[in-house]
Structure formats: C-alpha cells, structure tokens
Amino acid sequence: TRITSLESRIEKIKTENSDLRYQLKTQNGDQKDLQRNLAQHNRQRARIEKLNEDLKKMHEGAKKKAKDAREEVKTMRKEIKAKEEEIKKKEKECNAMKESVGKMRISIRKSMELIRKKQEKHEEQADKIDEQEEVIAQLQKELQDLREHQHQAGKETNVVNHDNDEKEEGT
C-alpha cells in the first residue's frame, strides 16, 4: 500500500508537473503576448508623443499666425480709418468746390445778363448813332444844297448888283 500510495503520489506530482509546465507555457505565451502588447503600446506612445509635439508646434504656429493676423487687422483698421478720414476730407473739399462752382455759375449768369443788357444798350446806341448819322448826312446834304443855292443866288445877286452898280455909275 505504501507503494500504491507512493505511485499515486508520483502520479499526482507528475500531473501537477504537467499542469505547471502547461501553465508555464501558457504564461510564457501570455508573457510574449504581453511583451508584444507592451512593444506595440510603446510604439503607439511614441507616435502619440510625436503627434503631441507636432500638435504643440502647430498650436504655436497657429498662435503666431493668429497674433500676426490680429496685428494685420489692427494695421488694416488704422489704414481704413485713415482712408475714411481722407475720403471725408476730400468730400468736404468737393462740397466746397461744388458750392464755389454754384456761386460762380450764379455770378456768371449775372455777368452774362449784364453783358446782354449792355449789348442791348450798345445796339440801341448804335441804332441811334446810325439814325443820327443818317440825319447828319441828310442835314449835310440839305446844307450843301442850300450853299449851292445860296452860291447860285449870290451869283445872280452879284450880276444884278453889278448891273445896278453900272446903272448907278451911269447916272
């Protein structure tokens, strides 16, 4: 019985041994799986860290671009404000010029009206001068006719006077 009990014990130990070997193999397989998983995990962690660094760089770049864009917007706003002021100034100048042109037009219209009135007066005076020249010409003609008539009459008077003088001398 003692042999049987030893044999049974040996069998039991062999079974345990076999179970332990199986567990060891399984554990070795699990350990290899774990090591594979750990290596994969480490590679993923390295990739994530690289992505995080890239993300930080992108974030910094985006911050710088945003800052530059804000500065550019400020500059553009200042430029726009300056242009708006310039436009307002030009509009004021333009309005002043329009007003000046309007006044000039009124002044020109008044001047044209005065010129027209003066021209009408000049035309009236020219008509009067023409009329007076015609009257003068008529009067000069009449005067000449009268002189000729007087001259003619004077000759006749001289002849008559001369005859009278002769008659008086003869008496």
Image (cartoon, rainbow, N blue to C red):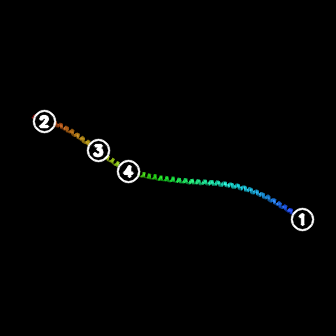
Element under disc 1: helix
Q: Residues within 10 Å of mark 3 (few under 14, many from 20)?
A: few
Q: Which mark is residue 107?
A: 4
Element under disc 2: helix
Q: Taking 105 as reference, is 41 left or right?
A: right
> If the image is split into quadrants, where does the N terminus sit?
bottom right
- For this orientation, the residue located farthest to the left is 171
Residue at mark 1 to residue at mark 4: CA–CA distance: 149 Å
User: Disc 4 or 3, which lies upstream in sequence?
Assistant: 4
User: Disc 1 or 2, which lies upstream in sequence?
Assistant: 1
Q: Taking 88 as reference, is 110 left or right?
A: left
Q: Residue at x 29, y 44 (%)?
A: 129
**Three-letter amino acid code at disc 3?**
Ile
Q: Residues within 10 Å of mark 2 (few under 14, many from 20)?
A: few
Q: Taking 148 as reference, is 170 left or right?
A: left
**Label 1 sits on residue:** 2
In the image, residue 149 sits, relative to residue 79, either above or below, namely above
Element under disc 3: helix
Q: Position of residue 162 (x, y in %)?
A: 14, 35
Residue at mark 2 to residue at mark 3: CA–CA distance: 50 Å
> If the image is split into quadrants, where does the C terminus sit?
top left
Residue at mark 2 to residue at mark 4: CA–CA distance: 81 Å
Mark nearest the camera among 1 and 2 is 1
